[in-house]
Image (spheres, helix red, strand yellow):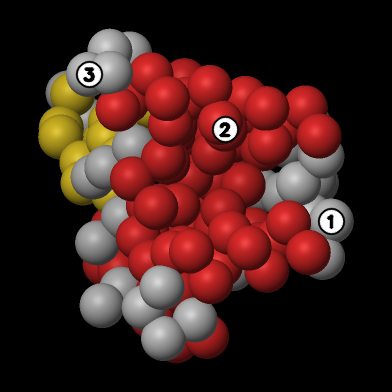
Amino acid sequence: MRAPLTELENEVMQAVWDSGPSNVEAVHQKVSRKRALKEATIRTLLRRLEQKGYLRHEEDGRAYVYHAMEPARSLAARAVRQIIDRFCQGSVEELVSGMVEARVLSKGELDRLEDFVKSQRRGGK
């Protein structure tokens, strides 16, 4: 089990997910659009994310190029699975019905979700 992402770590991961393999400078440019951070801070965050198992790096000359260990969607799916196991006794139906009852999902989202489930049952995409 990996340690959860902080808000800032999530922004750094989002920069890597959005751009693909990235060096420190590229991540810094993307993250610094929203936050005034030094490049050294980004370097520290990238190393920390690698230690946590979210990233890996390759050397490109003297620079490190960081790669996400898994897509954002996979990470999100595992996080949701943990929520389901912890709060819904392992029941996906319990989670979805709770979201519907709490009006977390809009009518449009419910319609798209229904269409997606139907297409999966037919074996399509």
Circle 3: element type: loop
Residue 58 x %, y %: 15, 34
Mark 1 crowdedness (10 Å alpha carbons): few <14, some 14-19, many ≥20: few
Left or right of residue 31, residue 75 in this image: left
Q: Of the numbered discs in the image, which one, if any, rests on residue 121?
A: none
Q: Distance between the residues labelled 3 and 1?
A: 29 Å
Quadrant in which the C terminus appears: top left
Q: What residue does disc 1 label?
A: 103
- Confirm or deny contact between disc 2 and disc 1 (CB under 8 A): no
Comes first in the chain, label 3 or label 2:
2
Above or below 47: residue 18 = above
Q: How far apart are marks 3 and 2 (CA)?
A: 15 Å
Circle 1: element type: loop
User: What residue appears at the point 17 percent right and 23 percent down from the top-left corner?
Assistant: 61
Residue 124 x %, y %: 28, 13
Residue 7 x %, y %: 66, 62
Quadrant in which the N terminus appears: bottom left
Above or below 39: residue 61 = above
Camera-side residue: 63 or 101? 101
Q: Distance between the residues labelled 2 and 1?
A: 14 Å
Mark 2 crowdedness (10 Å alpha carbons): few <14, some 14-19, many ≥20: few
Q: What residue does disc 2 label?
A: 113
Comes first in the chain, label 3 or label 1:
1
Residue 29 x %, y %: 64, 27
- Confirm or deny contact between disc 3 and disc 1 (CB under 8 A): no
Circle 2: element type: helix
Q: What residue type is labelled 2?
A: Leu
Q: Of the numbered discs in the image, which one, if any, rests on residue 123?
A: 3
Left or right of residue 101, residue 24 in this image: left
